[in-house]
Image (cartoon, rainbow, N blue to C red):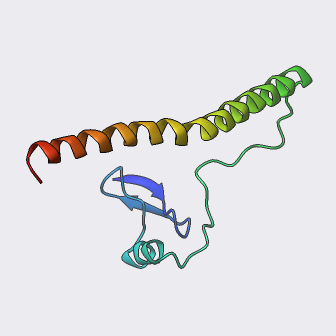
């Protein structure tokens, strides 16, 4: 048996499988219906540990880089998909015409 925490209520329970997420059917139904407020998280940051200023600056720069990359991708992805769907649509239309439909 594996000791784990319920993702809904945060209670520790003995799980038969390592993939178990809920301590009971009641918690499973709450999660399924979305009528719960998560009270537990897998890992909470330890705010008592202070990072050196250089480490903080590096983390901030990495966060900015990732945000810029994500922003750039979110702007170009729709156009790339639009072009792919246009080619696919043309191909399907051609195939249907070849079949006489």
What percent of the width, then of the height, locates residue 66? 69, 31
Q: Nearer the viewer, residue 57 or 38?
A: 57
In the image, taking residue 48 as reference, residue 66 lies left or right, namely: left
In the image, residue 55 above or below residue 28: above
From the viewer's perspective, is 98 left or right of 17? left
Image point 53% across, 66% down: which residue? 11
Q: Where, quadrant-wise, is the C terminus in this rendering? A: bottom left
Q: Position of residue 70 (x, y in %)?
A: 65, 36
- Measuring 74% from the left and 26% from the top, which residue is drawn there? 62
Q: Outermost residue toward the top?
A: 54
Give me the residue at 55% from left, 70% from top. Answer: 9
Q: Quadrant of residue 3?
A: bottom left
Give coordinates of residue 75: x percent, y percent: 63, 39
Total marks drawn?
A: 0
In the image, residue 64 sits, relative to residue 42, either above or below, namely above
Left or right of 63 on screen, residue 3: left
Residue at image location 45% in from the left, 74% down from the top: 27
Residue nearer the viewer, 50 or 30: 30
Quadrant for residue 90, please give it: top left
The front one of 17 and 7 is 7
* Farthest left residue in view: 99
Vertical order, 42 against 62 (above or below): below
């Amino acid at each position: 048996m594996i000791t784990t925490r319920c993702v809904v209520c945060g209670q520790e329970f003995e799980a038969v499988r390592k993939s178990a997420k809920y301590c009971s059917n009641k918690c499973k139904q709450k999660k399924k219906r979305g009528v719960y407020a998560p009270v537990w998280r897998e890992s909470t940051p330890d705010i008592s540990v202070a990072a050196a200023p250089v480490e903080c600056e590096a983390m901030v720069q990495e966060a900015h880089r990732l945000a810029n990359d994500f922003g750039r991708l979110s702007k170009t992805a729709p156009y790339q998909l639009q072009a792919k769907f246009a080619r696919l649509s043309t191909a399907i239309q051609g195939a249907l015409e070849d079949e006489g439909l």
